[in-house]
Image (tube, rainbow, N blue to C red):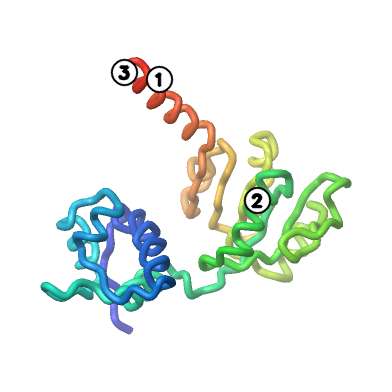
Amino acid sequence: MQKKPYISMSVIRRLPRYYRFLKDMDRRGILRVSSKELSEKLGLTASQVRQDFNCFGGYGQQGYGYAVRQLREEIGNILGLNQAHRCILLGAGNLGRAIATHIQNNYAGFELAGIFDNSDAIIGRELAGLTVLPSSSLKSFCMAEKPVMAILCIPRTAVESAVDTLYSLGIRNYWNFSSYDIDLHYKDVVVETVHLSDSMMTLCYRVSEKETSS
């Protein structure tokens, strides 16, 4: 098996933006794009775009640009979007419902296999084509279905015990919407934490700075 080239995490974090832009171009029937065009759309330099793509082979020709579909497919392969990692969602409140619907409508490498909640008012309802299950059935479900990733849309106070349970069931990958730092407690997990409050505070600072300087 051919060894995959090393791609830094800073490049990996830019690839979804490239992918979204190229997917839209492909949908509109655009066949080729230059590094200059990409850089202008994404707020990068043309040099940065070329360096990023050279990490996995380039796929561009001088004066000819990049083949949109080929480049999109290659980035999709690198990101693993052609796979269907089975995942579960904990918490079917407002945020959980939005996440479940997003996954269902915007397939990106994951297949939502189960949704869990503690509320009697929510259990039994249909969401994203699945019936919301009680959290008490989490263990038996995971043992039978073997999900590899959990999406956490539950309160901070409930996350620690939930992660302890999930970790004991072999789940090592998390999309975490709480403020609980999972990787500080379990060093071998893969975590993407979305700190909504952190993002809001950063935005507040930027708005305040703009108002002060104007």
Q: Residue 112: where, in percent of width, then height? A: 65, 64
Q: Residue 207: where, in percent of width, then height? A: 41, 25
Quarter of the rendering occupied by the N terminus: bottom left
Residue type at the position of mark 2: Ala
**65 and 199: which one is in front?**
65
Residue 166 lies in quadrant: bottom right
| Residue drawn at the location 76% of the way across and 64% of the way down | 130
**205 and 25: which one is in front?**
25
Pick whichever of labels 1 and 2 is earlier in the sequence: 2
- Residue 208, numbered label: 1
**14 and 133: which one is in front?**
14
Residue 209 lies in quadrant: top left
Marks 3/2: CA–CA distance: 36 Å
| Residue drawn at the location 27% of the way across and 76% of the way down | 67
Judged from the image, the secondary structure of the residue bearing numbered disc 2 is: helix
Number of callouts in the render? 3
| Residue contact between numbered discs 1 and 2, judged by CB atoms under 8 Å | no
Q: Residue 128: where, in percent of width, then height? A: 71, 62
Residue furthest out toward the bottom: 1
Find disc 2 in the rendering and name its residue.
Answer: 98
- Residue 214, numbered label: 3
**Left-right relation of 69 to 89:** left
